[in-house]
Image: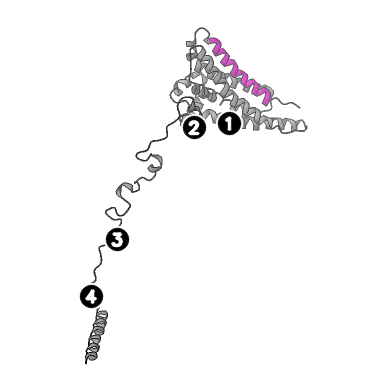
Amino acid sequence: MMSGNYHHIDNQKVSGSVAAVTDPGHIPVQFAESNLQTFPPSGAQGKISGASRPPRDADDSFSKPVNGTEEPQQPGGWLRAFSVASYKPYFDVDTVDVLERIKDSLFPFNGSFNEKTTNNPDLYGPFWICTTLIFVAASIGTFVTYVAHKVEKKEWNYDINVVTWSAGLFYGYVTLVPLALYVILKYFSAPSGLVQLFCLYGYSLFIFIPTLCLSIVPLEIFRWIVAGVAGFMSASFVALNLRAHIMSAGERWFLIVAGIFLLQLALSVVLKMYLFTVTF
């Protein structure tokens, strides 16, 4: 009798379970509210807090220091000469500035170059002028000697020393001469900015680029005339721009200006004698 009752109860449990499965409408199902209803979530969740979100302008995060940190300090004193950042202002010029300064160098009698570049002398123009001169002098000088040998039907050999000699001449001249002048002016109590002198002498060499190109003409007298005119213009450009400043050095200012003028003329003679004098 008892076993029958147990059997009856088990049947009721089974039938109740089947009914619960077959009729899901009787089982209430509740879902927790999800933040996926809106994207992105309105509030910060988890480890990503509002303070650590990426900045709206991601590029600025690479150029600006993080809050609480400082930019590395530049070395002071003579150590600045070994810092690349200390030379950055001297290359902060655009094409318009360089072309304007080149134009001033082609009109040497204005004498206003120093005034225009006092607050912003650059080394960008002088560097590329000297580099261009090295290439032009080596290539055109080689071409002139090659043509001369072929006309005379004589053997011609390429001279690699033309490149090294040109590099030493132009880079050395635009570095050592302003440096020596800087020391001289400081001795005579008329100091001038060293970068200003580098800038002035660098742009004074631009006139020699078209001069070297014109030297292709196989006429010796024409080459001498072109070299003389270029040397006179370059020397006048440097001397006239420094004259007003050097006059404060006292009675010897004329000797200094004359020395500057003659040294620039000597450069044009050296270029003519070495690069455009053909020897067989």
Q: Give the spatial CA distance, label 3 vs label 1.
A: 63 Å
With 256 as the anchor, is 64 left or right in this view? left
- Residue ID for mark 4: 27
Colouring style: one colour
Q: Which residues are magenta?
A: 254-277
Q: Amino acid at mark 2?
A: Val
- Residue ID for mark 3: 36
Foreground: disc 2 or disc 1? 2
- Please tell me which of labels 4 and 1 falls first in the chain: 4
Image quadrant where one finds the C terminus: top right
Q: Give the spatial CA distance, label 2 vs label 1.
A: 20 Å
Q: Count how many numbered circles sit on residues in the image.
A: 4
Q: Amino acid at mark 1?
A: Thr
- Residue ID for mark 1: 131
Image quadrant where one finds the N terminus: bottom left
Circles 2 and 3, Cβ within 8 Å, touching? The answer is no
- 188 vs 155, nearest the viewer: 188
Q: Magenta stretch containing residue 273, yes or no?
A: yes
- Check the image and report above or below for 62 versus 270: below
Q: Is residue 222 visible?
A: no
Residue most toward the top? 251
Q: Secondary structure at mark 2?
A: helix
Q: Amino acid at mark 4?
A: Ile
- Please tell me which of labels 4 and 3 falls first in the chain: 4
Foreground: disc 4 or disc 1? 4
- Residue ID for mark 2: 84
- Please tell me which of labels 2 and 1 falls first in the chain: 2
